[in-house]
Image (cartoon, grey):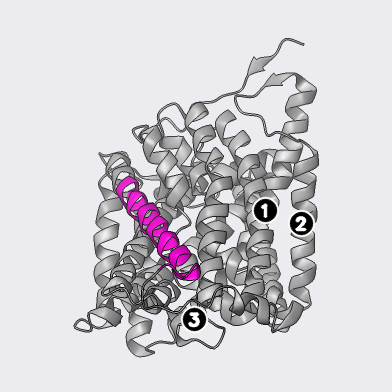
Amino acid sequence: MTAKSTAVRPESHLGHTMKPRQLTMMGLGSAIGAGLFLGSGAGVQAAGPAVLVSYLVAGTLIILVMWALGEMAAANPTSGAFSVYAERALGKTAGATVGWLWWLQLVVVIAAEALGAAGLLFSVWPVIPVWALALIFMVVFTAINLTGVRNFGEFEFWFAILKVLAIVLFLGVGAALLLGLLPDVASAGLANITSDFAPAGLGGIATALFVVIFAFGGTEIVAVAAAETEDPEHSVGRAVRTVLWRILVFYIGSVFVIAAVLPVSSEGLASPFAGVLDAARIPGAGTAITLVAVVALLSALNANLYGASRMVYSLAERGEAPRFLSRLSGASVPMVAVGISVAFGFFATVLELLFPDRILPALFQLVGSTCLVVWGTALVSQLILRRRADRDGTALPLRMKGFPGLTIFGLVLLALIFAVGFSAESSRIQLLSTFALVAGLAGACWLGARFAARGRHPK
């Protein structure tokens, strides 16, 4: 059979003005947000230095997921991304379910990042209350998302550069501190890591694993953004190739420094990057990194609002959400989708006013394991669609190496994460809640499709 290309142009109504450099930097910076700047400290508190095991396991999984998504996104760049791929591989109910699940996950994360950024800024500038800062952030980034994808991409480009530079500088200071190169500053060396590597045992690693998974959530936005990028077939490949070294350098490197410098009982783990720099006794460095963390969280908020609005737009385009959610502005922005995606964030600021300091921890607990369902669906979809393409002799612009072995390994790793998760009470409750949510969404999507079909074909 003659090979043919299946590379498809994205939705014709959305803009295609995001630059390849913007998509690449989004790939670098999309997951550098609340999970790294705040969640890394919680991970060390839960597992001690053994949190590195959690990062290695979750990092390996997200690398495989992104390779699989890259293959599918290069062949079919669409704002529905893994929701569309799941629909093609597993049917309409599966596609709609994973789309709505990811959208719900993101709207919660948007609220968490607004509150997290507000809390960090309040810690160094206690003038405006947290709830009011969060409200200001929500208004500003809603406006940015309504101005067009080119402006959004440029904001993310410079935000990502700032985050990357800050983490590189942090790693340099951390290395100097651990090697005893800073004058008048005692180095703990590797004592904190070697003295008690896993103080909470397997249960602590399991608990930290779900904190870490939250940190990696958002990386898959690159597959969504491919639909509005110039030359997506090549841009996606460049963005996906950054995932491996980003995980190794930014995440594993940063968490190694944090675990080595700050003991499990350290109060500095509440804001771990600032805690490390305070231990290095660099004047003003703790405040500076806190401000960078604020920018990082706002960048992630910006990207997640973009991703959520495009997903619900795609669902509306495919008849899996009310049609009015696909309405576009003159700048080719799904403005109603942006509005509904940001609504929960505004509601969360009101809750923060009523229940100070209690909303952010609750939001973190809601979204940890939903990522696993989305990633697992992406791997299964790629396994099916790649076999289908190979059987039909279809040429793909980007092919995942090591197929099917690496895809299957990713699914095995995912199954092991679920098994470990059920071994700890805290993560077990989270997993059961996620399964109940998925079952409810799947039932609602199936019923919605039945009613829609009955309306189109009345007896």
Q: Circle 2 sits in a helix, a strand or a loop, which is it? A: helix
In this rendering, the label closer to the viewer, 2 or 1 = 1
For this rendering, which residue is in front, 237 or 77? 237
- Picture coordinates of residue 307, whole percent (x, y): 45, 51
The chief SS type of the magenta part is helix
Say if 413 sits above or below 456 in the image.
Answer: below
Q: Point out which mark residue 190 bears.
A: none
Q: Looking at the image, tell me whether mark 2 or mark 1 is earlier in sequence order.
A: 1
Q: Which residue is mark 3?
A: 361
Seen at 63% across and 56% down, the residue is: 59
In the image, 169: left or right of 82? left
In the image, 174: left or right of 336? right
Q: Which residue is mark 2?
A: 413
Q: Looking at the image, tell me whether mark 1 or mark 3 is earlier in sequence order.
A: 1
Q: Which residue is mark 1?
A: 60
Q: Circle 3 sits in a helix, a strand or a loop, which is it? A: helix
- Picture coordinates of residue 361, whole percent (x, y): 49, 81
Whether residue 388 is visible: yes
In magenta segment, residue 306: no
Whether residue 305 is visible: no
- Picture coordinates of residue 141, whole percent (x, y): 29, 59
- Picture coordinates of residue 433, whole percent (x, y): 66, 74
In the image, 257: left or right of 60? left
Mark 2 residue crowding within 10 angstroms, few (<14) / some (14–19) / many (20+): some
Q: CA distance from mark 2 to mark 1?
A: 9 Å
In this rendering, the label closer to the viewer, 1 or 3 = 1
